Amino acid sequence: LRSAADLSMSDIRNTPAILIGGFNNTWTLETTKDLPYTFKDGIRIEKKNDLAHSWTIAYKQGESSTEDFALISRLLTSNTGGPVLSIGGIGSFGTQAAAEFVSNPQKMNALLKSAPPGWENKNMQAVLRIKVVGYEPVAVDVVATSYW
């Protein structure tokens, strides 16, 4: 377990990696920048070349946000040369909820019920919407997926 700032490309080249964090993890940003869904401009997740499919946290002055969004990316072979699982939210609630989501077999099985045949041999991404109540992520919905 190491922070993104303490990793070099040679550390993760040709080896499996799990990247945790969205905008605060440079390796997440690097490995997902050319994928169908990406982190953009420090404030949103968007579908590549399709701004109609974009998710941003709504902030109100003096109040905490009531939702967050997260991006899960599973790459069989990434630009690092090895497999990568990237889990990151726009904010910390999104990252926390996404990590809990991928480590819960029931939630992952529910997600994969809609996966195309042969998904096991494909890259995949999922965008999650997280409901936040009292500074805790309490509910997660899958709002978009991509397999290729």
Image (cartoon, rainbow, N blue to C red):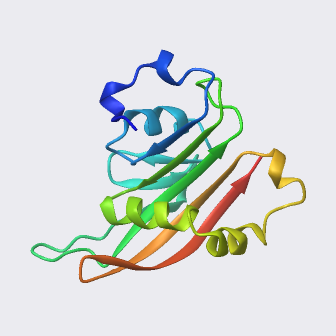
Counting every numbered tag in the picture gives 0
Answer whether residue 36 is visible to the viewer in this image.
no
Q: Is residue 3 left or right of residue 55?
A: left
Looking at this view, name the residue that lies furthest to the front.
Answer: 1
- Looking at the image, residue 106 sits to the left or right of residue 38; the answer is right
Residue 68 % position (x, y): 38, 68
Please, which residue is most extreme toward the top here? 10
Residue 128 coordinates in the image, percent (x, y):
52, 67
Up the image or down, 45 lies above or below 79; here it is below
Q: Residue at x 46, y 55 (%)?
A: 45
- For residue 141, which quarter of the picture? bottom right
Res. 14 visible in picture: yes
Relative to 146, residue 143 above or below: below
Q: Vertical placement of 59 versus 43: above or below?
A: below
- The part of the image, by quadrant, that contains residue 67 is bottom left
Which of 91/82 is in front?
A: 82
Foreground: 7 or 78? Answer: 7
* x and y percentages locating residue 137 in the rendered image: 37, 76
Q: Which quadrant, please, contains the N terminus?
A: top left
* Residue lying at 44% horizontally and 38% vertically, measured from the top left: 29
> Is residue 64 rendered to the left or right of residue 6?
left
* Residue under the point 15% across and 77% down: 63
Answer left or right for 68 relative to 59. right
Q: Residue at x 39, y 48 (%)?
A: 21
